[in-house]
Amino acid sequence: MEALNLITFTQNASRLGMRIQESFSEHTRDLSITRGAGSLFDMPDDKLKNIGRQLDSSSDREKLDAMKKLIALVSKGRNVSNYFPQVVKNVASQNLEIRKLVYIYLLRYAEHEPDLALLSINTFQKDLTDSSPLIRAMALRVLSGIKVPMIGSIVVLAIKKCAADISPYVRKAAALAIPKCFQLDPNHQPALIEIISALLRDRSPLSIGSAIIAFEAVCPTRLDLLHRQYRRLCRILVDVDEWGQVDLLNLLMRYARTMLPKPIVPPNSEGSDEELDPDLQLLLSSSDPLFQSKNPAVVLAVARVVYYAGPPSYLPKITGPLLRILGTSQAVERVVLGYLFAITSVHPHLLSSHYLRLLVRTDDAPQVKQDKIRLLINILTLDNYQAVLREFVEYAEDVNDQVVADAINAIGQCARLIPACTHQCLSALMSMLKSKHDIIVSNAVQVLKFLVQNQLLSGTLAPASTSQSPLTIISQLARRIDDIRHPQAKACVLWLVGQYSPTQEGGTVIEGIADWGPDLLRKAAKTFNQEDSLVKLQILTLAAKLFLLCPTDRTLGLLSRYVFSLGRYDTNYDIRDRTRTLTVLLAGISPAINGDDGAEDQGGVVLRREQVMKVLFDGKAGILDDGPRSGDNNALIGSLSLITGKDMHGDTILPEWLELGIEPSLRDSEDDVTPTPAPVQAISSSRIVKSSNATPVVLTPTGNSAPVRDARESFRDLDKFYADDSDKSEEFDSSSAEQDSDAGEEDDDSKEDEESDEERDNDADENEEDGEDVDEEHERQGRHEIQT
Amino acid sequence: MAIDGLIILDGSGRPIIQSGYTAYPPAYPLLHIDTLNNALAQVSRESDVDPVLYVGPGIGESLAGSACCHIEVGGGLRMIASISGDEDPLVAFAFLQAFLEILQDYFGAVSTATLRDNFDVVYQLLEETLDSSGHPLTTSPNALRDIVLPPSLLSKLLASVSPSAPTSSSGRNTGGSFGGNGTGAAFASPIPWRKAGVRHNHNEILFDVVEEMRGIVGRNGVTLVSNVWGKIESNAKLSGTPDLLLTFTNPNVLTDCAFHPCVRLQRWTRDKALSFVPPDGRFVLAEYQHTSPSAVVSHLPVPLALKTNIDIGEFGGTVHLTLSSRLSTKELDNVEVELYLGDDASGAQCTTSSAGTGVGSVGGAEGSWSFDSRKKALRWEIPSMRTSGSWVLRGSWTSKSKTPRPAHAVHIRFDIPAYNFSSLKVDQLRLSGENYKMYKGVRGRSLGSIEWRW
């Protein structure tokens, strides 16, 4: 008997030993797999052959391994759709890990292999009733991804089933499957709309975001479905997840502009007399807390609501939050600056006192620097121009050429927008002419040209110091022509000199021409051949003008003729054309200018000197610089077009306000029987009468409606409900809690001592936990405990 | 239209992870990758690339262009979100940031190696966070941890052992039930940001108040603007459903706040107290700004002073910087002064010294300098700056250009451990809803990023 026992015992022992060994080897094997996943990623091709065999194997581990290999191949960009039939068999696997990977594979390839996916459609349908919400959702996602119109009605049924699921996660998946089903076969629209309106009624805020996505995809124009949900959607806004908030805010904004009466703004008031529809007020007040979201996209969506649906008195609310999200990241800063630019183009006053937040830093990206400069010009006022102008002068020394150009242009804009600072601008620009950097000089010259020209045209000649008068500036420019190398700047100076050299003052070398004119022509003639064609054209014009002013001067005549003959044989036909035009024009004054002594009479009209004067000098007025770009005012805040500056062919359009709005009673639902929603304080008394007339359905007698309403209101808001609740509990245990926490500190200390004792006794295989403890200790270092 | 897809590029610009792009021709993601790589090749500093790149039309039937929104992830990695239509790029950037935070939450540091080691997890995460039609789904790490198991060694062991347990019949069941336990609770929690049934042996919650001062100082040494951006980072390891109430002694130093969704906003507006049920693990509880309390001076004082004397000559120039601390009690750590010397800069030669720093000046206290030939910047690092004394950098640089164009500002970065600019002080942290003792800790830290013009 004992012997028998012994035998069974040894048998059992050996079996146990084998088992242990087996499991051990399997552990280690798997360990090597997990550790070497990197090598799995870079595995050689010959191992791929095994995948098919592994997928067919009966071991779950083999299958899992094969699935991981497949996903690795997917991430390498390989097409592994040829394993589809073998993978699809595993969708019914008992192991959840395998099933998840199988579904990931299926989600990617079901659209390419619809026929094969159809084969396993029964499994998917069965999985719709799985106990795990995860599997139910995944099954629906794969099912809706199969692009075979034939199964459309099955998918609709599946969606309908899942839309009534107990898990909000599955309801969310159902909502997201709706657009796909609609794409597959638009004939299902009525059924889908029914599901959508059911989903919109969902009590849980979790799935609302996805329901909105489905709404926008399937029936974006059916805003009437929202009538009864509008108020509830406004109220649950705070509890929706952040991505849903973005979509919901955009939808509610669209609803408000389509269905609610436009806010009435009396022309000459400062916001106190604005008339707001209570429902609009509700939207604005319930979206206001979301300005405190950490997600910049949500903050922007709220700003859009206020900007496009709010009355003017609400506008200042958007500046603080938008300025705050500027600091989120460089990428966000870049995008938000673009939006701020669009906003300040219409409402410059919003940011003008916050200009300090928009100063350029040298480590900003060039695009950000340019945007900030544009913005600063937009918000320029009499109060801040001194500081902003100083900044622009600072930016002119930037290391990026485009930023330099923008900054110097901005100085010109300052002078144009705030005439009081013209003097400062001019002296700043003049000092830039001394810069060693080409790019600064040439940009300064071009801006100076604009300023000088505008001043001379408008006749508002600064009576101030002679060093700032336009003509002195021109003469200084003429003197510095050798330092100006940028062709456009050089051409600018030449043109200015030619245009403004006529003078009434006596005492010049050549009568009627300022001294610097002919000298500049002399210099330019010498270097004519090396110049850019842009400069050559201006040299020709200068020669023609000077010659016209004093045809009798011999030196000037010779100089002009020299320049014209150079132009006549230039390689560029543009320059040859210009030369011909000018010489013919001047033929009436001196035929000799043609260079061939007027041997042949060319006939045609010959102009007199006064007429030529008119042609060459007049009509050069009104070249005002274009100012800030105002091209894409139609792009919306929060759209890609505004950022890229290109038409992105988006389908988002801003609906026009409805003057009167639709009947507010349509929005009454069983949720709020009370005639008017709470926020009525901002509405004039006449308005109250009107709206209560409009909502005749008062179910509760007025006598005792007040207490009922109070009770409802306190329960309407979940947060408030919790807050009240927690208040009570705090009051209840605050005294004891304080005592407790005092004692708690000591407890903590002693507990830690105990733990350290325990740690010493611990076995080696609990090392991992120990490590965690050490980490914790490490983390606690440097923190002081909160003293309560 | 929404986010068309997401791509992660490695340091050499090749894609490692790429989402489905099922609705687009295969060349579409490639076009985005090429656009970004071309743009990166054209600039000397990577941060100079516009974060939103326009990608022209040209492929497929769609006539409209699209845009490539990208962020740098660290370790040379980049993430791209392609968007088309009139989608708001902010949604793309917010999503990229959220996905990056999830990856960091799962793998600690994000690098090519960690992504390759855990590509199956990354794909599951991608599948759960971004719908195939391009709408972000759930991005709360707590909810995700229920669906996608984080790759800890323990969970891998369990997952691999259970299905292959010796007794085949029961093994299958345990395998199934294990999976059921792991994911059956998915979205079972009534609070979307907190998973249900959390248990910890030690209950503790730690707060890090991190503040960063960003400022610009003009060339005359007058502070033009300085703002403090603060963040309350938290690491909660609390069991059950703890309801916390955090109060400050001086909540009025906080302005323009933004909160984690768990914070009850109405409570904050009413009595400036943070009432919340925290998510499990690390999260950012709040972000705020701190501005000068007085109405007269619109900026906060910068905690250090710099004297600059920089001369630009031909083919180079000389630098003479003197730095001293203005703080009377705390040391400034890891001070880093950087001057961009222009694209043509070819080298620099400097000496550093420190004066009046006391007797016990250790080797290297005066800092070290280096010339970054890739970023063309002169960098001066001082590991620790005491409250008294001054630090001097003297030297010259050479440039290939006759007229060098250095940046006209010196960039200074520093840390101040155990210090807060706003001197925000936690008054109490009270727990309700659970009755256990918890360890509570607060730590302050400040960073600075100052631009000093010359």
Image (tube, coloured by chain):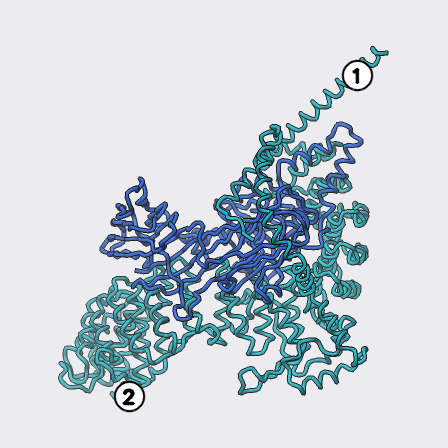
| Amino acid marked by disc 2 | Gln
| Amino acid marked by disc 1 | Phe
**Residue at the (67%, 73%) spot, across then down:** A255
- Badge 1 and badge 2 in a common chain: yes
Colour representing chain A? cyan
- Using the image as rendered, state which of residue A128 and residue A743 is in the foreground: A743
Residue A517 x %, y %: 20, 77
Q: Which residue is mark 2?
A: A611
**Residue at the (76%, 35%) spot, across then down:** B174
> What chain is the blue one?
B
Q: Which residue is mark 1?
A: A9
Residue A371 x %, y %: 44, 66
**Secondary element at tag 1:** helix
- Using the image as rendered, state which of residue A676 and residue B117 is in the foreground: A676
**Secondary element at tag 2:** helix
Q: Disc 2 is attached to a residue of which chain?
A: A
